[in-house]
Amino acid sequence: MNNSDIRQPEDELQYIRKIIEESRAAFVENGKIYILWGLIMAIGMGVTYLSFLLNRNLDTGYVWIALILLGWIMMIMLYRARKHKGQRAKSIIERIDTAIWGACGGAIGLLVIIFMLNYHYDPSSSFFSTLFDTISPFVISFFSAIILGIAFYLSGIVNQIRWLRNLSFVWWAGAAAMFLWPSIHVFGLYALMLILFQVVPGIILQRRYHRITIAS
């Protein structure tokens, strides 16, 4: 066996490590996405929670539609800014991570749409009631928290960021609390969790990205 045969596996391993490190650096920039959608969802859930507490129709459906449209406009602006900078093509790890959050985010968006389509305001009721044919609004938060936990777990594994993976257990614990004690307060709990366990991690990832870029 010659030296070239020995070096080839080592070179391949170094190349794989390089791809992983570059993917991590690129991934942490996606903290912007965490912050953006975390704030949008938290505002939407906050308005929904306030509507229930005040027993008033605050046009929650229109608020959600406006927030989702704003989110997609911001996403397009971020994509164009990235494209304008001439960023390199995505690695396989980045593609996997994008697919994870795209699938989970789409599932949560579908739940929100189902909530809006099935929602009916009854002004004659003593309680700000929601009449659902098949699904309760409290279950929406429960399922959304479970899906977010899956996204955090898979994303943390793919990018080898342990604390990000461990956030999944926090989301699943929150989902269990929402399921065991269903009430209007699950909306407030969900909004608070979005701030603490999605927006704040997004800020941490952003700061980490800046440290990596400065160091490089």
Image (cartoon, grey):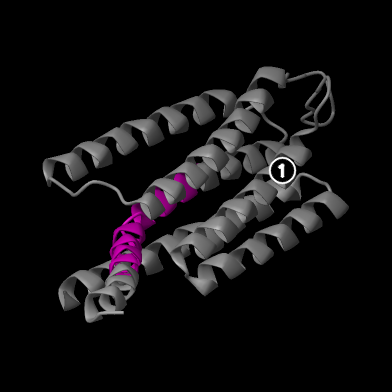
Residue drawn 45% across and 33% down?
67
SS category of the residue bearing label 1: helix
Which sits in the foreground, 15 or 174?
Answer: 15
Give coordinates of residue 176: x percent, y percent.
Answer: 80, 56
In the picture, the quarter occupied by the N terminus is bottom left
Which sits in the foreground, 5 or 162?
Answer: 5
Give coordinates of residue 76: x percent, y percent.
Answer: 29, 33
Q: Residues within 10 Å of mark 1 (few under 14, many from 20)?
A: some
Number of dots carrying numbers: 1
Residue drawn 12% across and 45% down?
86
| Farthest left residue in view | 85
Q: Quadrant of residue 173?
A: bottom right
Residue drawn 68% across and 65% down?
169
Kindly identify which residue carries mark 1: 143
| Farthest front residue in view | 1
Give coordinates of residue 130: x percent, y percent.
Answer: 78, 26
Give the extent of the magenta segment.
15-40
Which sits in the foreground, 189 or 87?
Answer: 87
Please say whether residue 199 is one of the residues in the magenta stretch: no
Give coordinates of residue 47: x percent, y percent.
Answer: 58, 39
In the picture, the quarter occupied by the C terminus is bottom left
